[in-house]
């Protein structure tokens, strides 16, 4: 039995739609695998009742198929599905690392990115890799034209998850297919600012660079309480706030000294509109870790 911990991730970061992603210190999925004649999947943990165990419908089934690596796969979900924290991607990334090891396929983490992205194609209709890349590689990742660039980063964040859910498939329907030149110019400027901020571990630059006037405004309309939560986080000291992935999770960047206040303000703001939520106070962290192996 071989065990892999694969972290939650936050994709887009506002200005980097389908391009940027970060690995989060917490939460994470734990994926255990052992060789079997055919793939069998069992799922426990947060939201497991909503996750299919049929290999044709689970992201890890798509990964086992792509690696030609049938296995008994146990997923212990720490990342709630349809939350915006890359739940489907965490399982896929964990399975990719575990099965690559189990079957001695010898693929690098970069080579596993398109394989894990097959799982995303299964659930959202598109093999976008902006969640699987940081879950596999850690830190901050840029996926551009199929090529992944990674930098280690250590930025404090608060990921606040309301009890509501938004499916990525639905949230992709509201993405506009056109943008004005001035919005594109602003977004390029913000994305560049954010990327430099990651290389400098600078929460101010990262927070400022998350602004986006193209995709995010359409997505926030799907999240009850978004404007109130964003305002509350900024007032409590966040340097930037945006939708995490396809939502409904909301990501705030901050300095360590204001992390606790930001988390409390976000929970209170959701509470004020009658929505329960939980906040992860964490930092941009490591990629999937293979931490236990037994014969
Ligand atoms: N191993 C898995 N883990 C989680 N969800 C899975 C898994 N396999 C299939 N799914 C399905 O994928 C959907 C959740 O994926 P979705 O992309 O909508 O959410 P997410 O991964 O939490 O969010 P985001 O990609 O916005 O960060 C659910 O319908 C769920 O049943
Ligand atoms: N880039 C993807 C991430 C969510 O899986 C989206 O926003 O649709």
Image (cartoon, grey):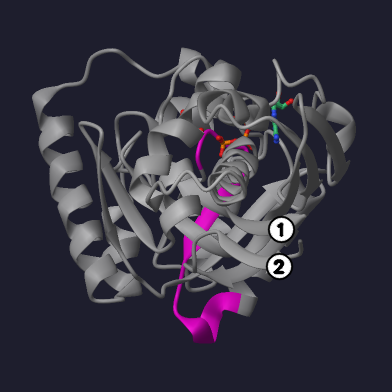
Quadrant assignment, res 281: bottom right
Residue on which disc 2 sits: 292
Image x and y of residue 20, in percent = 33, 46
The label number, if any, that marks residue 3 in the structure image: 1
Q: Do the residues labelled 1 and 2 touch (CB within 8 Å)?
A: yes
Image x and y of residue 159, in percent = 60, 58
Range of the magenta residues? 245-259
**Viewer-nearest residue: 207 or 169:** 169
**Viewer-nearest residue: 3 or 121:** 3
**Secondary structure of the residue carrying numbered label 2:** strand
Q: Is residue 288 visible from the viewing direction of this image? A: yes
Ligand 1 neighbours mark 1 (CB distance < 8 Å): no
Screen quadrant of the C terminus: bottom right
Asked whether 248 falls inside the magenta stretch, the response is yes
Q: Which residue is painted at 29% across and 75% down in the image?
A: 202
Q: Which residue is painted at 15% across and 32% down in the image?
A: 184
Judge from the rendering whether residue 172 lies leftward or rightward of residue 295; answer left or right. left
Q: Which residue is painted at 35% across and 72% down in the image?
A: 203
**Viewer-nearest residue: 50 or 229:** 50
* Crowd around label 2: few <14 · some 14–19 · many ≥20 (10 Å): few
Measure the C-alpha gap from mark 1 to mark 2: 5 Å
Image x and y of residue 227, in percent = 54, 44
Q: Which residue is painted at 60% across and 43% down in the image?
A: 99
Q: Judge whether 138 appears above or below 13 on screen.
A: below
Image x and y of residue 88, in percent = 63, 35
Quadrant assignment, res 147: top left
Q: Is residue 129 visible from the viewing direction of this image? A: no
Q: Judge whether 43 appears above or below 101 on screen.
A: above
**Secondary structure of the residue carrying numbered label 1:** strand
Q: Which of marks 1 and 2 is nearer the N terminus?
A: 1
């Amino acid at each position: 039995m071989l065990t892999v911990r694969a972290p939650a991730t936050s994709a887009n970061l506002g200005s980097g739609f389908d391009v940027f992603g970060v690995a989060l210190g917490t939460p994470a999925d734990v994926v255990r695998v052992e060789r079997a004649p055919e793939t069998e999947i069992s799922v426990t943990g947060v939201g497991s009742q909503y996750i299919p165990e049929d290999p044709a419908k689970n992201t890890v089934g798509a990964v086992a198929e792509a690696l030609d690596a049938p296995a008994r796969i146990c997923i212990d979900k720490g990342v709630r599905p349809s939350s915006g924290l890359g739940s489907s991607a965490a399982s896929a990334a964990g399975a990719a690392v575990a099965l690559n090891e189990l079957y001695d396929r010898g693929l690098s983490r970069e080579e596993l990115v398109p394989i894990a992205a097959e799982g995303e194609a299964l659930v959202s209709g598109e093999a976008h890799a902006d969640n699987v890349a940081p879950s596999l590689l850690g830190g901050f990742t840029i996926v551009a034209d199929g090529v992944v660039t990674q930098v280690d980063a250590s930025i404090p964040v608060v990921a606040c998850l309301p009890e509501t859910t938004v499916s990525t498939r639905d949230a992709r329907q509201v993405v506009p297919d056109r943008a004005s030149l001035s919005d594109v110019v602003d977004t390029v400027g913000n994305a560049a600012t954010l990327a430099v901020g990651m290389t400098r571990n600078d929460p101010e630059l990262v927070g400022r660079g998350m602004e986006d006037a193209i995709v995010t405004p359409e997505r926030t309309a799907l999240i009850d309480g978004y404007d109130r939560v964003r305002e509350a986080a900024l007032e409590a000291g966040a340097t930037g706030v945006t939708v995490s992935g396809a939502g409904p999770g909301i990501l705030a960047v901050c300095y360590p000294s204001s992390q606790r206040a930001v988390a409390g303000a976000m929970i209170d703001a959701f509470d004020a509109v009658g929505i329960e939520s939980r906040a992860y106070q964490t930092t941009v962290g490591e990629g999937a870790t293979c931490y236990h192996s037994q014969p």
